[in-house]
Amino acid sequence: MRDPIDLLTTLEAPEHEPLPAAELRRRGDQRRRRRTAGVGVAAALLLAAAVTVPNLLADPVVPAGTPTSDPTTAPTPTADPTTPDGTDDQPDPAATPIPTDFPLARHLPTGPDYQQVDPAEAAGIEVCGHVLWPAAAAQSRAAMVVGPEHTELRWLGVLADADQAVALLADTRAALAGCATTGTGDALAVVPLTGGTGYDEVTVALVQADGSLGGEVVQLIRVGSAVLLSVSGGELTAESAQGTADLLTAQSADLAAAMCVFTAAGC
Amino acid sequence: MDATEFDDLYARSFRPLVRQLYAVTGDAEEARDCVQEAFVRAWSRRHSIRVDEQPEAWVRTTAYRLAVSRWRRVLRGRRAPDRALSPAAVTAPVDETRVALVAALRQLPHAQREALVLHHLADLPVAAVATQTGVPEGTVKARLSRGRAALALLLSDTVVEGAHRA
């Protein structure tokens, strides 16, 4: 048998007709223009969050699932949405269907560079032995887009009751506690991040442990019996992940308002 | 980097880079897509990439990261409908040696495969492989040695299996 290195050095890829260089330059120019425009959009969203979140925090009435002053503390639902004997006169938030106009994809990027992808095709997200997604839920909806430089996933899950939703986030926190790296082979570093939606939340980055580019920011927020998962994957590092987290936080805070239908007392 | 320099770089580097990435991924179409995408990014960032600072290495690293991105893997097997209308690969007779080699490479640990490809296909010296992969030179040498031995064993097994089937 020939030396394997001899074989390797003579390896040829099947022939493909490459795109013309001019076409690549055209796409690069288009990408550059879009990237420049995107900075303004991100800044606007962050500004909106800076205005909206303090207003919510200032609300003297704090029903279940609305922002609390300490974003790191999981709020306990003030009322059990259901009672064992079924005499509860509140609507069961877990039984509330996800509104058809729920704006799950509101902040997802659009344009010719982005493909909408069936989230069922995505690999699951497992962190430190804990399956973050897909998660079991009574109802759920998901949206995902994949672009040349990053991927965005949003998942809204409505659990059987608020206690189960609380437990979902608690289990996630427990799995992350003391877990510095996850995965095998190309290990990912687990980097806790600051959220700031004011809701019960977990925000974390999974980045290449060797410091190279690539990773995702994962954020979970809970409002009543509903959990919103936001994932932004792309050319992240541990240092740049907080910026992405800030953007997700602004978007999550915006979507949280639409999740009030899944609280017993409303927002 | 101006348009002429970019076009020269593309003409000179496209096929070697696709070949290297093919050895890493085992998927020729994916390799071509990643390399083309890396060139698109290089042009979109041309003001920060200098021709005297090894732009080919920048493109290679970018293409490689794209190929191993787990988010990008989501799309594998799910090609856009117009792919069927894009220029097709030239249909060549199946090269069983190439198929066996690619299959064997895919069984190697990622780090060994990367070292073998960078050193033997990209012709990078050990020191450059060490720099690019962020490990000491001794580690690169060990990976090359183990990778070569594992590849020989895997190809030997393939040959034996092929002989048994024959």
Image (cartoon, rainbow, N blue to C red):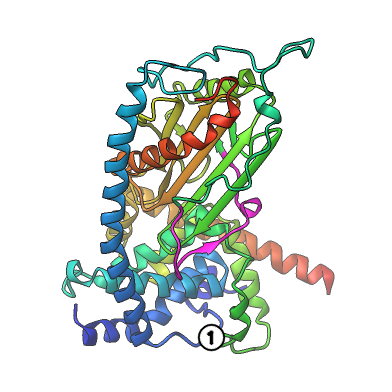
Task: Check the image and report above or below for B160 versus A246.
Answer: below
- Chain designation of label 1: A
Q: Main secondary structure of the magenta part?
A: loop
Residue depicted at x 46% and y 53%: A108
Q: Find residue A185 and report its horizontal and vertical position in percent.
A: 51, 44
Residue depicted at x 23% and y 70%: B54
A116 left or right, relative to A33: right
Residue depicted at x 53% and y 30%: A260
Towards the viewer: A16 or A148: A148
Residue B15 visible, this orientation: yes
Task: Check the image and report above or below for A74 versus B47.
Answer: above
Q: Which residues are magenta?
A: A108-125
B148 left or right, relative to B3: right
Q: Amino acid at mark 1?
A: Glu
Q: Which residue is mark 1?
A: A15
Magenta run includes residue A159: no
Towards the viewer: A28 or A156: A156
Magenta run includes residue A110: yes
- Badge 1 crowding class, 10 Å Cα cut-off, few under 14, some 14 to 19, many 20 or more, is some
